Amino acid sequence: MEVHLESPSGKYQATSKLEQELTPATPRSSKDRVLIVICAYNEAKTLPDLLQALRQTNVLVVDDGSNDGTGRLAAMEGAVVLTHWRRMGKAVSLQDAIDYALDNGYGIVVEMGADSLPEKGAIERLIRPLNSSAIGGASVRQIPVGHKNASYYIDELIWSVLSHGKSIQMARNGTAHLGGVMYAFKPECVSSVEDSVNDDEHLSVCIKSKGYRAVFVPDAIVYFDASSSIGHILQRRRRMYYGHMVYPESTAPSMQIGVVASALLNCLTEKPSRLPWMLPAVFLDMVSRLRAWRDGRCIKKRGEYTMWVTTFEKNMVSGALRGNC
C-alpha cells in the first residue's frame, strides 16, 4: 500500500482514495500497538533483507524521494509506504511517521535504519520497558558488521564506547541517551522533530524535558553496517557531533567527558585487543568534533546536515552476518 505526500511541507496526509482505509474515523487507541518505522532514501539494495526479517509486524516505510524504486519494493514486501515526491530530509520523514502513528492509534514507534538487522527477539525486548508509564523511550545495543579492516576495528571500538556509556548513564541516573540505529519511543511523549538536525537527540532531549526516562536495553541487539572507510567514519561522526552540539542539554555519552572516559576504559578492559585502535579512534573523534564545531559557526551548513546522506559505499549487513565479508 502506497500513499503519496503532496503537501509542500511533506506532512503526512493520506490521499482521498485511501483516506478511509489508512485513517479510520475513530482511530483504535492502544498503548501497546507497535509501529515499525523505516525512513529510507535510495535503500532498494539494503531494504529487502530487513523487511523480510520484519514480517508479521506493522511496518511503515517513508520513502524520501528515492529514485531507485525503494517505495515500490517496500510496498511489494507488504509495508505501508508514504512517499515524498522530492527529498525532504530525515526529520520531515520521521515527523510524517509520527503523525501517521498518532492518527492510527499506535502507542509505540520503533524507528530503525534501512541498513540494520535486529537480532531475533530484539524488538520485543526493546519495547518491554515502555510498559512503564515512567518510560518514554528505549534504545538497543548496536553492533557494526562488515569487512574486517582498519575502519571496522575503529568503528567497533567507537560503538562499544557508546554502549558502555549508556550503561554508565543507567547506573548513575537510571536513564540513558536514546540515540542509535534502532530505538523505540511513545509518540505521545514527543514534540515535533520536523526542524531537527539530529532526530534521535531531539527525541531524547524532548522525552527528558517532559519528565519521562529513556532506558538502554543491552540485551536488545541490532546489527548495522560498519563504516566502510576512514572517510566514512569521519563523515558519520562529524554529522553526529554537529547534531549533538545543536542541543546544549545533549544527553549523548560522547558529550559527557567523564562518562565517555569511563566507557572507553571499560571497553579496553572488556576486550584488550581493542587497545591498538584506541589512539586512531580518539584522533578521528577529535577531528570530527572540530569539524562539526567549525560547521556550527556557519548558518548555511544547517541545511546541508538536514538533508545529509552518506556518500560512501555501505556494507551489506545480511551478507556480513553470513560470513561473506
Image: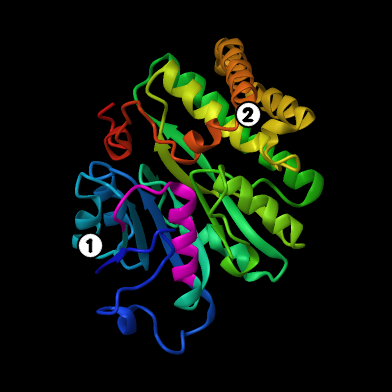
Q: Circle 1 sits in a helix, a strand or a loop, which is it? A: helix
| Mark 1 residue type | Ala
The numbered dot on residue 97 is none
Which span is picked out in magenta? 84-101
Instruction: Please check the rendered image and state whether residue 86 is part of the magenta-colored stretch, yes or no.
Output: yes
> In the rendered structure, which amino acid carries the disc numbered 2?
Gly
Magenta stretch, main secondary structure class: helix
**Structural crowding at the residue carrying mark 1, measured as other residues with C-alpha within 10 Å and reported as few (<14), some (14–19) or many (≥20):** some
Quarter of the N terminus within the rendering: bottom left
Q: Are marks 1 and 2 in contact (CB under 8 Å)?
A: no
Mark 1 highlights which residue? 75
- Front of the two marks 1 and 2: 2
Q: Quadrant of residue 186?
A: bottom right
In the rendered image, the vertical position of residue 314 relative to residue 170, given as above or below? above
Horizontal arrangement in the rendering, residue 175 relative to residue 181 (left or right): right
Q: Quadrant of residue 301?
A: top right
Q: Quadrant of residue 84?
A: bottom left
